[in-house]
Image: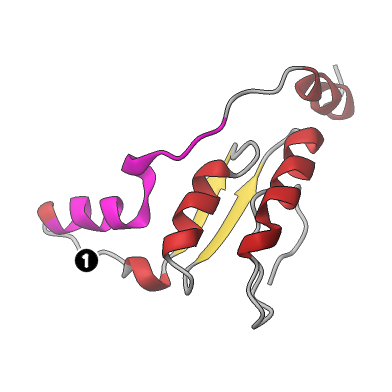
Amino acid sequence: MSATEAAFAYDDVLYDSEANPSAHPSSIATLACLAGLPGASPASARVLEIGCGNGANLLAAATYLPDARFTGLDLSSRAIAAGDERSRPVKRASGRYVAAATSGRSIT
C-alpha cells in the first residue's frame, strides 16, 4: 500500500477527538516542576500534537492560552478540514494562526 493509499484509507473512518486535560500545557508544566525540571511557561508554550484529529484538544488549550502557539498534524484530510473549520473562531486578529490541524503546511 502506498502512502497515498494509506492516507486515503485513513479518511474512511473518523475517530473521536476531545480535550485531554493531562496534555494541557499547564499540566505538563506542573509535572515538570514536580520532577524538578525547568518547564516552559504555559502562557507562551509551543505545542505540537501529532495525530490531532479535528484539533479539539488543541482548540481547548488555545482558548485559555491566547499567546501560546499550537500546531496539529494528522493524516486524515477530513479531520484536517474539520479542524480548520473549528479553528476559525480561535484565530487571532494579530495574524497569529492557531492551527487545529495541518498536513505539512507551514503555519506561522
The part of the image, by quadrant, that contains residue 39 is bottom left
Write the start and end of the magenta stretch as one range.
17-33
* Image x and y of residue 41, in percent: 31, 70
* Image x and y of residue 23, in percent: 37, 44
Image quadrant holding the C terminus, namely bottom right
In the drawing, does residue 52 fall left or right of residue 8? Answer: left
SS of the residue under disc 1? loop
Which residue is at the front of the view, 8 or 56? 56
* Image x and y of residue 42, in percent: 34, 65
Identify the residue shown where x is 66% and y is 61%: 89
Q: Which residue is mark 1?
A: 38
Asked if residue 54 can be seen in this view, the reply is yes
Q: Given the current orientation, which residue lies at the most extreme bottom position?
A: 94
Please state which amino acid type lies under the numbered disc 1. Pro
In the drawing, does residue 65 fall left or right of residue 30? Answer: right
In the drawing, does residue 58 fall left or right of residue 78? Answer: left
In the drawing, does residue 100 fall left or right of residue 66? Answer: right
Q: For the residue carrying disc 1, how many other residues have a C-alpha within 10 Å: few (<14), some (14-19), or many (20+)?
A: few
Identify the residue shown where x is 11% and y is 53%: 34
